[in-house]
């Protein structure tokens, strides 16, 4: 198996970043389109291949995982995880897709790129075929480095756009310190569920404003809470010592007794005596069944506050001082960045804010 030294690769990537420049030819045009394509995994596969070839001319550029049959195969997954992923996080967030383990995704679980690999039909399949056709045409480390610099040029543009996406910029938003403006905004924003992302973001920002700087509020991506042993609720609250002091479940879709019990079981396993279960504006649930479950669990020693998003917002906003709508929306965007929220969610956050006066 061909070796790619991680330290050498890191230095090459840093140098390419500093020397990033646009190239105008068919290969560069393909690289630009691939890095701006909707398919997330192949972005990492492409940049990893360019970096590997720049570091070791002998590598087979279509390699993805260990186990290749020729001496030219290399471990693309480890190179990406050890060099490209941390580089993106530290130097250019959002330049690719902010993935922690891109080669664990299904499209990259093959030993090498092949037109026979399973992928969605249409543009995704076309991209795979182009990768298989274009990458082997890069014959030398010199060529690979030239196109790595071009890739870094494209990645810089993507990074700048990523930062703009989570910024208010010149968006006209009322800066009056009126709590009612924030509540008006919450009312309008919660008309849109946006696949369940809106309510958790609102809760995270209100908890941050309510608790202050002595606490760390950690929202988790929708449908991924509990995917790590360190995650308890949709939103976890830590004190200054890093101790979990609260967990909040947020549902913006219909739920039942079992959903509530499941959430509380997680809270109890984390040794929490109190918790919150917040539900969206248009959610349906069996009140008798849920309230009876909460009563039973409460008698067992765990109190869970079941509350609607609007009542929760009214409660928290009533206890805030000197809060402006602009500050509130800016906080939502920061948490949106933390959970890598969908574009539609970010657009709604900005557009609705501009309508509140």
Image (cartoon, rainbow, N blue to C red):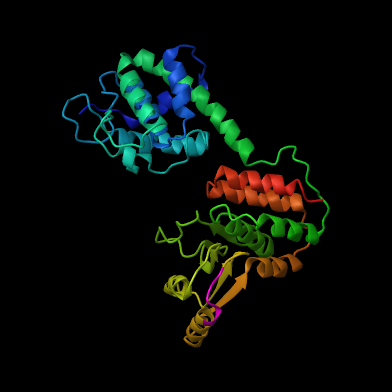
Placement of 339 over or under 216, stated as above or below: above
Placement of 260 over or under 113, stated as above or below: below
Q: Is residue 280 left or right of residue 22?
A: right
The total number of labels drawn is: 0
The picture places residue 107, in percent across and down from the top left corner, at 33, 38
**The one of 131 and 77 positioned closer to us in this rendering:** 131
The picture places residue 225, in percent across and down from the top left corner, at 46, 59
**The one of 251 and 273 positioned closer to us in this rendering:** 251
Report the residue at 44% width, 38% height from top.
Answer: 86
Q: Main SS type for the magenta part?
A: loop
Report the residue at 28% width, 28% height from top.
Answer: 115
Res 186 quadrant in image: bottom right
Residue 286 belongs to magenta span: yes
Give the residues in magenta.
Answer: 284-288
Which quadrant would the N terminus be assigned to in this image? top left
Q: Is residue 57 visible?
A: yes
The picture places residue 350, in percent across and down from the top left corner, at 69, 45
Res 73 quadrant in image: top left
Name the outermost residue toward the bottom.
299
């Amino acid at each position: 198996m061909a070796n790619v030294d991680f330290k050498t690769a890191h230095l090459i990537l840093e140098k390419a970043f500093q020397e990033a420049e646009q190239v105008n030819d068919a290969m560069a045009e393909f690289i630009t389109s691939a890095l701006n394509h909707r398919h997330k995994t192949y972005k990492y596969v492409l940049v990893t291949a360019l970096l590997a070839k720049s570091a070791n001319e002998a590598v087979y550029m279509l390699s993805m995982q260990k186990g290749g049959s020729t001496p030219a195969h290399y471990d693309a997954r480890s190179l990406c995880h050890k060099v490209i992923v941390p580089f993106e996080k530290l130097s250019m967030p959002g330049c690719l897709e902010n993935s922690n383990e891109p080669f664990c995704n299904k499209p990259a679980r093959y030993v090498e790129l092949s037109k026979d690999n399973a992928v969605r039909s249409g543009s995704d399949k076309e991209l795979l075929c182009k990768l298989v056709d274009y990458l082997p045409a890069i014959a030398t480390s010199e060529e690979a480095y030239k196109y790595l610099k071009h890739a870094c040029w494209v990645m810089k543009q993507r990074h700048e756009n990523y930062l703009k996406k989570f910024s208010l910029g010149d968006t006209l938003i009322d800066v009056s310190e009126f709590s009612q403006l924030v509540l008006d905004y919450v009312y309008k924003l919660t008309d849109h569920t946006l696949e369940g992302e809106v309510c958790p973001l609102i809760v995270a920002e209100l908890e941050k404003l309510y608790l202050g700087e002595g606490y760390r509020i950690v929202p988790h991506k929708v449908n991924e809470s509990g995917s790590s042993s360190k995650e308890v609720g949709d939103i976890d609250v830590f004190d200054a010592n890093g101790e979990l002091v609260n967990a909040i479940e947020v549902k913006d879709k219909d739920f039942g007794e079992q959903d509530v019990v499941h959430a509380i079981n997680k809270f109890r396993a984390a040794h929490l005596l109190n918790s919150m279960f917040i539900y969206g504006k248009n959610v349906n649930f069996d009140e008798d069944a849920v309230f009876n479950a909460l009563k039973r669990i409460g008698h067992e020693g765990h109190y869970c506050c079941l509350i609607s998003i609007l009542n929760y917002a009214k409660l928290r906003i009533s206890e805030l001082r000197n809060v402006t709508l602009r500050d509130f929306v800016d906080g939502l965007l920061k948490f949106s960045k933390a959970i890598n929220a969908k574009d539609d969610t970010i657009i709604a956050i900005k557009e609705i804010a501009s309508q509140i006066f």
